[in-house]
Structures are given as structure tokens and as C-alpha cells.
Image (tube, helix red, strand yellow):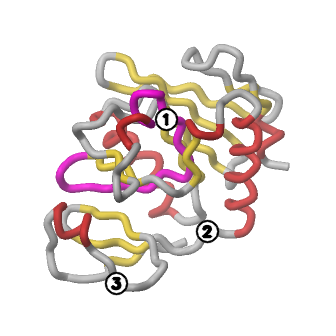
Amino acid sequence: MTQTVVSNKFLTIEDFHTFDDGSDTRYEFIDGQLTDMPTESAFNCDVARELFVQLLKFIPAKLLSYKEIMLEVDGRKVRIPDLMILGKDCKAALIDKTRGTITPDMPPPLVAIEVVSQGKSNAARDYRFKRSEYAVRGILEYWIVDPNEYKVTILTLAEGFYDEVVLSSNDKITTTLIPELKIKVSDIFN
């Protein structure tokens, strides 16, 4: 998956929120520019879908977002995480909104989850750039699911920065946010 800058024209966040090119293309907004979100590989979609199914065992469906809600990181960026676990306050803030965007005046999601696509620039985006952006946004946990390495990196926000734990194979994904949640890493890569 390679992202492409769609236009050289710089937009405001307000322009982005009203942008509609009549296509089904999903765009992220990065520093004034639209960046298209190409279709994921079949394997990445399978991994994201399997994780979603596993999460449904522990979390009500209404608190899970599967590629439908955008996250405004600051006045210059809007990201589309592969999955998000929304808190009740975050979900309540989205009710009656005409666009599924979590804006800076709303509570952040509890967890943002990215499934890493192949390629060096995709890995850099998920491991480096989004890591700092999500920390600044106050997202309590950021999970990086890496099908290329068959591992999951759990980042937990502590004093403005993420502490990191890397899980593989028979390790279990757990979180203090949902104490009963236990998902075996190998189950999401089957």
C-alpha cells in the first residue's frame, strides 16, 4: 500500500471536513494535503477483521470502530486508524454528528490500532509518526499489529510518552483498560 498526495493545493482542516470528490476514496489529511488511503492487501484485511472478531468477545460492537471513523490529531492531521476502541464518552460525542470524525474537542478513543502495510514508508508512518501523533492526542494505548513480523507492539501512554511492550506468537494481548481482554497474538495472524 502506497499513499499518494492527491493535490499540491494546501487545504485547511475546514476544507478537508467538507471535501467530497464524489468517489469512495478515503483520504487522510496531513499538513494541509489530502493523502489517499489505497486498498489494503487481502492478508492485512484478514488480520484486521480477525482482530475485530476477537475484540467483539470482550467489547460491545458499538464501542469498536472498523475503518469508519476518522481521528483528528491536531489542526493539521486527520488519520484513519484500522481499528479503534472508543470509550463511552467518545462514542457519545459522535452521536448526531454528520461526519464520523473525532475532533480535538471530543474525548480521544481509548485505543488506536494500526495494521502495518508492507514497505518502509508504511512502517515508518505506523511505528514513528503515528506513535508521536497519537501520544499528543492523548490516546491511552496504541497497538501496532505487524503482519510482516508476526508481532504486536502495545504502547501505553505514561507521562505524555508511550511505554512499549512487544508481543509475539503465544503471548497474549492484555490491557488494563479492559481487564478481561486476553487475545493470543497467533490467533490474529491465522
- Residue 84 belongs to magenta span: yes
Q: Which residue is mark 1?
A: 86
Sort mark 1 into few (<14), some (14-19) or many (20+) by Cα contacts within 10 Å: many
Query: Hey, what amino acid is under mark 3?
Result: Asp
Circle 2 sits on which residue?
40
Residue closer to the observer: 177 or 147: 177
Q: Earlier in the sequence, mark 1 or mark 3?
A: 3
Q: Write down the quadrant of residue 139 in the picture.
A: top left
In this picture, which residue range is highlighted in magenta?
74-91
The answer to whether residue 144 is above or below residue 119 is above
Q: Which mark is residue 182?
A: none
Which callout, 3 or 2, points to the residue nearer the camera?
Answer: 3
Residue drawn at the location 75% of the way across and 58% of the way down: 46
Q: Residues within 10 Å of mark 2 (few under 14, many from 20)?
A: some
Left or right of 167: which side holds 68?
Answer: left
Apparent side of residue 36 relative to residue 65 in the rendered image (left or right):
left
Which SS class for mark 3?
A: loop
For the point 56% across and 36% down, which residue is it? 63
Give the CA separation, mark 3 to mark 2: 21 Å
Marks 1 and 2, Cα distance to the nearest angstrom?
23 Å
What residue is shown with label 3? 21
Residue 14 lies left or right of residue 38; in this view the side is: left
